[in-house]
Image (tube, helix red, strand yellow):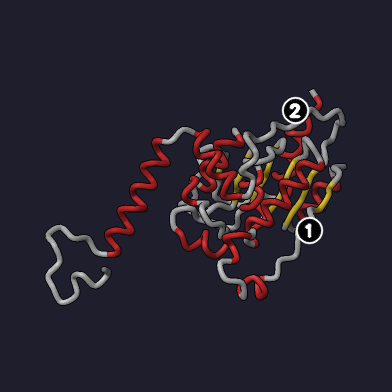
Amino acid sequence: ALLVFHGRPLPDRTVTADQLTRAWIDGARRQLTESPLSVRAAALRHALGFAHEVAPRAPAANPVRRPPVLVAGTTPDVEAALRQAGHSVRAISFTPFDQAAADKVRHFDTYNRTAASQRVADIVAALRAQPGAILVASGDAALAGALAAAVETPRLAILDVQGFDTSGDEAFLERLYIPGLRRAGDLQTASEIAQGRLVIHNAGPQFTASGARVQRPRLTPAQVRELVRQATSASAR
């Protein structure tokens, strides 16, 4: 059946494989634009392995004056600035991922979490263990943190994405490979769910997440500390 046109002229208006792929991508983008957030959110939770979650939990009221600050992948100077200001800083533990072993399993990511989605799950678990916490992360942990906020919303997440660019597939394949993620709206959908609680900095020139506060320069440790202070002050009111 696949060779039906072998050695014969193709029908009029036949598209190439590249044209067909582009049409699929364009159709998916149109559907994302037209779909309500509730539909995209359900698709995102499914891609992240939280399909049973009907909605993200809002940050719980925190009676302590200084909510804990969960850190992941941050640089020592950021952590030092937070500790110096008197914040309780707690590092997130990540589940070891054996990529070599995963590569030996056919269709591994059909039934198992990828390295990126496991980081998301670990951050979700940490946020649930510390309701009302503030998340400060950088690198791939920051990207995972943005997605985790769509499942368990932190009081605030300050995320250094280290130049990540959302405009093409390459960055996602290299640093945020989760099957179905782009089809669900990826970081754009996550930022809308988080409702302004994401501060994303050190972003690539074409990074887009309209539901977050996005800036291209990297925040200094003092600026991170000030954002944490503001979030802490708001929680104490």
147 to 173, vertically: above or below: above
Q: Quadrant of residue 31?
A: top left
Q: In the image, 48: left or right of 18?
A: right
129 vs 201, nearest the viewer:
129
Q: In the image, 29: left or right of 184?
A: left
Give the structural element (helix, strand or loop) at label 1. helix
The location of residue 10, given as percent across then percent down, is 15, 66
The location of residue 44, given as percent across then percent down, is 55, 45
Residue ID for mark 1? 76
* Distance between mark 2 and mark 1 Cα atoms: 26 Å
Give the structural element (helix, strand or loop) at label 2. helix
Tell me which numbered mark, 2 or 1, is placed earlier along the sequence: 1
The location of residue 164, given as percent across then percent down, is 54, 56
Residue ID for mark 2? 234
Q: Which label was assigned to residue 177?
A: none
Callout count: 2
